[in-house]
Image (tube, rainbow, N blue to C red):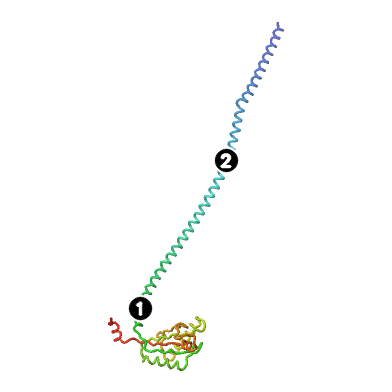
Amino acid sequence: MLTQWAGGKTTVKNTFIALVGALVLTAGCATKKFVRTTVDPVSAKLSEVDQRTAENAAAITGLDAKTARGISRADERAGAADARAAEADRKAVQAGERAALAMERAHGAHSLAEGGLARTGKLEVVVENLDNFRVTSTRTLYFDFDKAALKDDDLQQIDELVGSLNGARRFVIEVQGFTDATGATDYNYELGARRAASVVRYLATHHQVPSYRIHTLSLGKDQPVEANKTKEGRKLNRRVEIRAYLPQPMQELAQQTTTP
């Protein structure tokens, strides 16, 4: 009986061991199945989240770089706008200065215009007074070819013309120089001026005639008195004409004013 019990005990023990082993095997299989069905998907999702996190970080980094470049370009544009604004201010200041200068010049021109009008009024009075003068004596002096020197006969004629003024205090002497048609036009103008200057010089040095009472003009080969085709005609054109003017008497002026 003891032997049966011992054998039964052994059988129970083995059975227990078998049950424990089965439970262990069953637990191991269950654990692996749990890992496969629960843990592995979580790990995959974690890996996906990590990947997306890395991608988001890279995207954020790129966005920061783009933002920084955008801010830099905005700063550059703002700086350029400030520079253009400063240049516009400088040009505006210069324009204001030019406008002020133009206004000042305009005022100056206005003042000059007023002065010119005043001088014009005075000139009209002088011209009107000259209109009241009349020719009282004339002389014509003749010159050698391409010469401007006065001869003794010329000096005598000038003396006679001055004497005809009878010591008048108000008079005008007109001296015009001429040439023949030989030579260039400009040279003839200069030659006619030298011939007239010889007469003016004699009037000033020998008769103390003030220069403001002498009016000179060179007409060169213009206004010939004779044709330049002949020797005699050219001789007559090489001349200086002198005219003396005196004021008209008041009685004659009154008659001219009242005559219809």
Residue closest to the eye, 172 or 32: 172
Q: Are there few (<14), some (14-19), or many (20+) residues within 10 Å of tag 2?
A: few
Dividing the picture into quadrants, the one containing residue 177 is bottom left
Q: Is residue 99 above or below residue 149?
A: above
Q: Does dot 1 land on a helix, a strand or a loop?
A: helix
Residue nearer the viewer, 144 or 10: 144
Look at 40% across and 93% down and name the residue there.
Answer: 160
Instruction: Specify the label residue 124 is tagged with.
Output: 1
Assess disc 1: are there few (<14), some (14-19) or many (≥20) residues with their C-alpha within 10 Å of its C-alpha.
few
Q: Position of residue 186 (x, y in %)?
A: 50, 81
In the rendered structure, find residue 59 and report the number of the disc placed on it: 2
Q: Position of residue 165 (x, y in %)?
A: 37, 90
Quadrant housing the N terminus: top right
Q: Position of residue 234 (x, y in %)?
A: 48, 87
Q: Amino acid at mark 2?
A: Ala
State the residue at coordinates (47%, 61%).
91
Q: Out of 31 and 44, give the one closest to the viewer.
A: 44
Toward the front, the furthest residue is 229
